[in-house]
Image: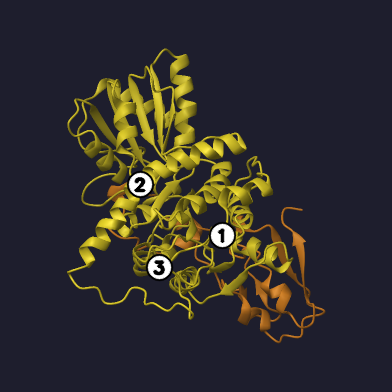
Amino acid sequence: MPKKKDDAKIVQISGEADMPPMPASLGSMRVNKTASWRSIRPIIHDDKCRRCMICWKFCPEPAIFPTDPPSIDYDFCKGCGICIEECPFDAITSEKEGK
Amino acid sequence: MTGNFAAAYGATSAKVNVIAAYPITPQTTIVEILSEIVADGLLEADFIKVESEHSAMAACIGAQAAGVRTFTATSSQGLALMHELLHWAARGRLPIVMANVNRAMGPGWSIWADDTDAVAQRDTGWIQVFCENNQEVYDTILMSYKIGERPDILLPSLVNLDAFFLSHTSQVVDMRDQKKIDTFIGKYKPEYKLDVDDPRSFGALTSPDYYYEFSYKMQMAHNQARTVITEVGREFGKLFGKEYGLTESYRCEDAEFLIISYGTIAGTVKEAVDRLRDMGRAAGALKIRYLRPFPEDEIRKACRHAKKIGVIDRAISYGHEGPFFTEVKASLYDTANTVYGFIAGLGGRDVSIQNIEEIVGFMQNEKPRNIIWIGVKS
């Protein structure tokens, strides 16, 4: 998984005077962690994974990274389930989020 | 059921024959549900998968022009993409019904509730109605087919529902009796349609000798729609037990402070009115359902005895003010009413009962000046 920048360095904005005229942000996705939208969580099973990288190619976010085995960024995975659907080796299973 | 289910079931109950739509958050489930309903054989319709919202409207225009009842759904950016064809559908006098899940226009990229998307299409000639709850979404889609398909109307309808507050929130919705719906709406039988056995052109080159009169006729149809909307709303009440009109008054008769609003905010305003009344303030709520045709007479009537009127817009026309604020003021131009304009809830920000109480407090203590932005962080 790529190294993430330090979250503590996020600038606190108190109001519109602190904001640029247009939404030109640096790293806005550090705070917009769309993981909260997820209701199913995909799990990659190392023993079944053949490293074909089809899951990485199909992930729309992308929330899957081409590591060995592929790794899911659970800060941004929205649980769309496409990786589960597309894996030719059934190496990705789903789990209900918040279990 | 959620507002999206209500919209999908509305189209199903109305027995539409062609659905062409493109997904966009938070409308996507409307079309997903319809695709399942069609696949399960519960609705005899052609479900056309298209590559964009522009194509979705084009497909509906083609099908409707060929004499078939159609339905589509979209939201913000998708609605904007259809813009030139919205003019086509209205000027072509095709009574398409479209559910629009009100979502903020980007950038800032937002999927949350904001009515600016619909208001930005105000001048296209569509009948435009805003729903307060999911029951209203379902009922309004049924009524919109009946209203739009009348030979003296022939106008498309945009049925608006706020993103997530309605589209993804479950509320109780009474499904109406299908046999009664069939009789109520009837079959779509246009006098003029694309028919190889009776060929004619549609939307052909129209010189200044005729364009003006077509525009006049379209305006007359909107004028007539005021009457028809009220008539159909009354008939709906008799058949199904819930009457609808161009507007809805709540405790307005003796109201000193009248709050005018639309969409989901109108529901919150009614709650706030009850609380304010309990606290001894004579508040009242007027919910505007139809933006087009605009119910000038109903507004003048409701405002007649109010000391102060506040209009809450979950939309803004940059460079001026809240769009409903402008339209309400215009309706009252020759009266002595004092009208305040408030902007609230843009981009999905919550508008609470407390916000409404603050609005009434402001109206009580201050003179109207420029529009007030409720809750802006400055």
Tag 2 residue:
B224
- Depth check, mark 3 against mark 2: the one in front is 2
For mark 2, name the chain. Answer: B
View extreme (top): residue: B280
Classify mark 1: helix, strand or loop: helix
For mark 3, name the chain. Answer: B
Please give left or right for residue B150 compared with residue B32 in the image: left
Which amino acid type is shown beneath numbered disc 2? Gln
Say which mark, if any, is on residue A34.
Answer: 1
Classify mark 3: helix, strand or loop: loop
Decide: is A60 above or below A10.
below
Which chain is tinted orange? A
Measured in 3D between alpha carbons, the distance from the residue under mark 2 to the one under mark 1, in whole angstroms, is 48 Å
Q: Position of residue B145 (x, y in %)?
A: 51, 54
Say which mark, if any, is on residue B82.
Answer: 3
Frontmost residue, B93 versus B319 = B93
Which amino acid type is shown beneath numbered disc 3? Met
Q: For the point 81% across and 80% down, which residue is it?
A: A48
Say which mark, if any, is on residue B175.
Answer: none
For mark 1, name the chain. Answer: A
Query: For mark 3, does the 10 Å Cα neighbourhood hold few (<14), some (14 to 19), or many (20 or more) residues?
Result: many
Total tally of numbered discs in the picture: 3
Is residue B179 visible from the viewing direction of this image? yes
Query: For mark 1, does the 10 Å Cα neighbourhood hold few (<14), some (14 to 19), or many (20 or more) residues?
Result: some
**Residue B108, image quadrant:** bottom left
What colouring does the structure picture have? by chain
* Tags 3 and 2 both on a single chain: yes
